[in-house]
Amino acid sequence: MALTAYARLRAMMDEGLLAAGQIVQERRLAEELGLSRTPVRDALGRLEGERLLQRNGRMLVVATITVPEIMDILRIRWLLEGEAAQQAALHMDAGEVASIRAEILGMEKGQLLTDEAHWALDDRLHLGVALASGNAELRRLVTELRQRTRMFGLHRIPARFEQGKQEHLAILDAIAAREPERAAELMRVHLDHARDAIIATLRRTPAP
């Protein structure tokens, strides 16, 4: 039951039903999920361990990711995902490359995609590459860092849609060609561009 509670709470966070800074109440969540408090308590402890929840005095709240933190996260992802792409170019199954490529090519124009669909497709590339690296610990770290990236709360950037799509395809091309150094470089350039787009968006966004 703890795994069920964890999965449902993660889904609520992904969907914005548990938003950054929101107070988390074990009893209320147990009632809402129709579960006893013990599995909910265990799930909350796991989420706190993953830094998706944090303590504010005696209260447990959904974590808030600051701008300096998101820059640090993207820098770590730059290091890890470059390595993942390099290893994937040595090991990734050709059928898996073709499958991810087909999904990316099937993406409609950015404005027609929901945030959920966009994140799912983005995960397909990034987590697929991390899995193909063959390093379970690297995949775990990439998964957690991507989740924290999402917790930053900035919605996808429409201007990045087509460029990001082409960058994903170029990464897959390098992996399919068994070019590890090129795959790593393309992944790092892709993450550099994502970082730059976030910075540009924040500069255009008025302070609350």
Image (cartoon, helix red, strand yellow):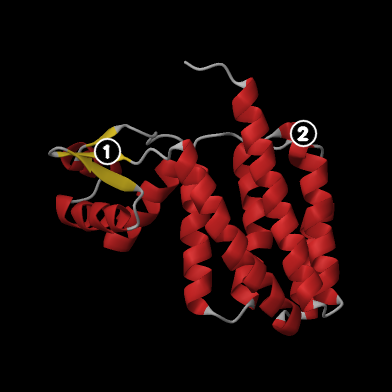
Say which amino acid is labelled 2: Ala
Residue 201: x and y in percent read: 65, 29
Q: Earlier in the sequence, mark 2 or mark 1?
A: 1
Q: Which residue is drawn at 27% across and 61% down?
A: 2
Q: Quadrant of residue 102?
A: bottom right
Is residue 114 at least partly visible in the picture? no
Residue 146: x and y in percent read: 53, 54
On residue 156, the disc is none
Q: Which residue is drawn at 39% across and 55% down?
A: 7
Q: Residue at x 25, y 40 (%)?
A: 29
Disc 2, SS: helix
Query: Toward the viewer: 105 or 91?
Result: 91
Query: Toward the viewer: 154 or 107?
Result: 154
- Up-down: is 10 above or below 156? below
Q: Quadrant of residue 135?
A: bottom right
Position of residue 40 in the picture relative to residue 144 (left or right):
left
Label 2 neighbour load within 10 Å: few <14, some 14-19, many 20+: few
Say which amino acid is labelled 1: Val
- Up-down: is 105 above or below 99? above
- Up-down: is 193 above or below 144? above
Query: Toward the viewer: 186 or 52?
Result: 186
Image quadrant where one finds the N terminus: bottom left
On residue 61, the disc is 1
Residues at badges 2 and 1 in contact (C-beta under 8 Å)? no
Disc 1, SS: strand
Residue 75: x and y in percent read: 56, 55
Instruction: Give the residue pinned by disc 2.
Output: 159
